[in-house]
Image: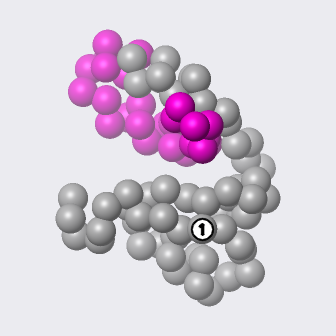
Amino acid sequence: MERGELAVCLPFLLEAGYSARSGADRMALMARFAELPTVTLDKEIAACAHRAEAGVLHYDGDYDVLAEHTSLMFESEWLAPAGAL
């Protein structure tokens, strides 16, 4: 975060808020994420990283499938090796 290399999008914020352990935890998470830039989405949600010329930090093999089998250009970066979490 300190290097300005992270951004968030609405689906991420919704997932993070849903996974919070309590109302206070959710408020703290959202306050922290509010410090980050936001990548806006339109009806073509899967293309958000492509359009922003950004990578996707994730723990979901679907992003690798999208990167491999579509014309979308984005770096697919795993948060941890698949199966580790």
Q: Which residue does the image show at 57% across and 23% down from the upper left?
A: 34
Residue 39 shown left or right of residue 31 in the figure? right
Left-right relation of 39 to 56: right
User: Residue drawn 31% across and 61% down?
Assistant: 80
Mark 1, Cα crowd under 10 Å, few <14 / some 14-19 / many 20+, is some
Tell me residue 44's x, y (percent).
74, 60
In the image, residue 76 above or below residue 7? below
Question: Position of 35 compared to 51: left or right?
Answer: left
User: Is 63 colored magenta in this rendering?
Assistant: no
Q: Which residues are magenta?
A: 1-27
Residue 34 sits above or below residue 10 on the image: above
> How many labels sit on residues?
1
Mark 1, residue position: 75
Q: Residue 85: give x, y in percent of width and height.
A: 21, 58
Query: Looking at this view, is 44 or 76 the one in front?
Result: 76
| Image position of 2 with respect to 22: above or below | below
Of all residues, the one furthest to the bottom in this rendering is 69
Please name whichever residue, 51 or 11, is drawn nearer the observer in this view of the structure.
51
Label 1 amino acid? Answer: Glu
For this orientation, the residue located farthest to the front is 3
Q: Is residue 61 visible?
A: yes
Q: Is residue 12 above or below residue 58?
A: above
